[in-house]
Amino acid sequence: MDKAAVWKRIDVLRDALAWSLEHNRLLTWGQRVYINMERSAWQRELDWNKINPDYVMKANYIVPGEIESKIRQISALIKSSGYDRSNYERQYINQWS
């Protein structure tokens, strides 16, 4: 997978996490853990790619199909509603600062 596709996937995962946390819907805490595991796996691949630009990035972990289905459902809700995770992230960061 190329860098742009990896960053797009990370964005989709972050959007799903933020939307789910803000709306308290669709994803359980355990499912959010699985999403963070995939996000972390892709971040590690990007790190390896920095060290070796010829490194072929591939997921060492991907979420199970049931969770992927929920991610797609959330992505559709985000697209139809125009949701922007930056508002959630600002609120979250202010809460912990």
Image (cartoon, grey):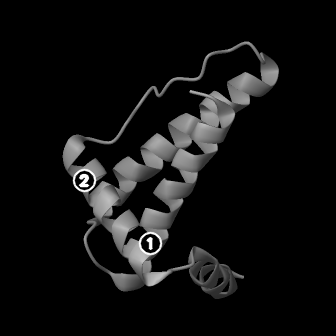
Q: Left or right? Give the position of 4 relative to 20.
A: right
Q: Position of residue 72 (x, y in %)?
A: 32, 57
Q: Position of residue 16 (x, y in %)?
A: 42, 64
Residue depicted at 28% across the width and 77% down the height: 25
Residue depicted at 62% across the width and 32% down the height: 44
Q: Earlier in the sequence, mark 2 or mark 1?
A: 2
- Helix, strand or loop at disc 1? helix
Amino acid type of the residue tagged 2 in the rendering: Ser
Question: For this rendering, which residue is in front, 2 or 88?
Answer: 2
Q: Position of residue 58 (x, y in %)?
A: 51, 23
Of the 4 image quadrants, the one containing the N terminus is: top right
Q: Which residue is mark 1?
A: 79
Q: Left or right? Give the position of 63 relative to 2.
A: left
Q: CA distance from mark 2 to mark 1?
A: 15 Å
Residue depicted at 28% across the width and 66% down the height: 27
Q: Which residue is mark 2?
A: 69
Q: Residue furthest front?
A: 80
- Circle count: 2
Mark in front: 2 vs 1: 1
Q: Residue furthest left?
A: 66
Of the 4 image quadrants, the one containing the C terminus is: bottom right
